[in-house]
Amino acid sequence: MNVKKRYGKNAVLIWKDRRRYLGLPLSFTRFYLIKNGDDWFKAFVDVGLFNTVIDEVNLYRMYDIALKQTFWDKIFGTGTVIIFTSDETLPKLVLKSIKNPFKVRDMFSKLIEEQRKLHGVRVAEFQTK
């Protein structure tokens, strides 16, 4: 994918991966994390070969991260990172069966905190009894 052509001359690809089967990238589901200069960080999910659907979400809209790893994921070194967002069209960003899920989770967590501070976004958490 030509990131500069698709997202502008200042766009930089930070991370990319594909959904994996038995540890092999044999899927048409692709995940990207792109930075456009100092303007924004966005996560993209690109699904399909002939007909593609691309979903995107700004990092500052993300508020919680979970990691799921099955027995087979552990054997093949993969896992699923689930990111909860305040985006209406993509409330749950699921990075399914990706390589190095712990590193990806930590990278996203760090970048999300930075972007939230930069944009002045806070999440109000409510407790109920």
Image: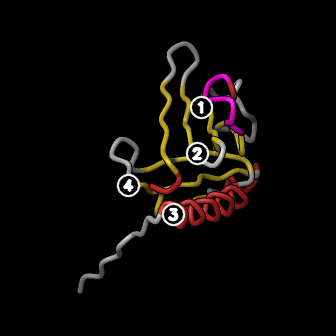
Mark-to-mark CA distance, 1 and 3: 27 Å
Mark-to-mark CA distance, 4 and 2: 20 Å
Q: Is mark 3 on a helix, strand or loop?
A: helix
Q: Which residue is drawn at 43% across and 50% down?
A: 92
Mark 1 or mark 4, earlier in chain? 1
> What segment is highlighted magenta in the picture?
5-12
Asked if 58 appears above or below 69 in the picture, the reply is: above
Q: In this view, does 15 lie to the left or right of 83?
A: right
Name which quarter of the figure residue 47 lies in.
top right
Quick one: quadrant of the N terminus?
top right
Rate crowding at label 1 as few (under 14), some (14 to 19) or many (20 or more) other CA atoms within 10 Å.
many
Residue 86 tag number: 4
Amino acid type at image mark 4: Ser
Give whichever of 2, 46 is nearer the camera.
Answer: 2
Q: Residue at x 58, y 46 (%)?
A: 39
The picture places residue 84, in percent across and down from the top left corner, at 45, 57
Amino acid type at image mark 1: Thr
Q: Is mark 1 on a helix, strand or loop?
A: strand
Amino acid type at image mark 3: Arg
Look at mark 2 in the image and give the residue it sits on: 96
Q: Does the magenta stretch include residue 39?
A: no
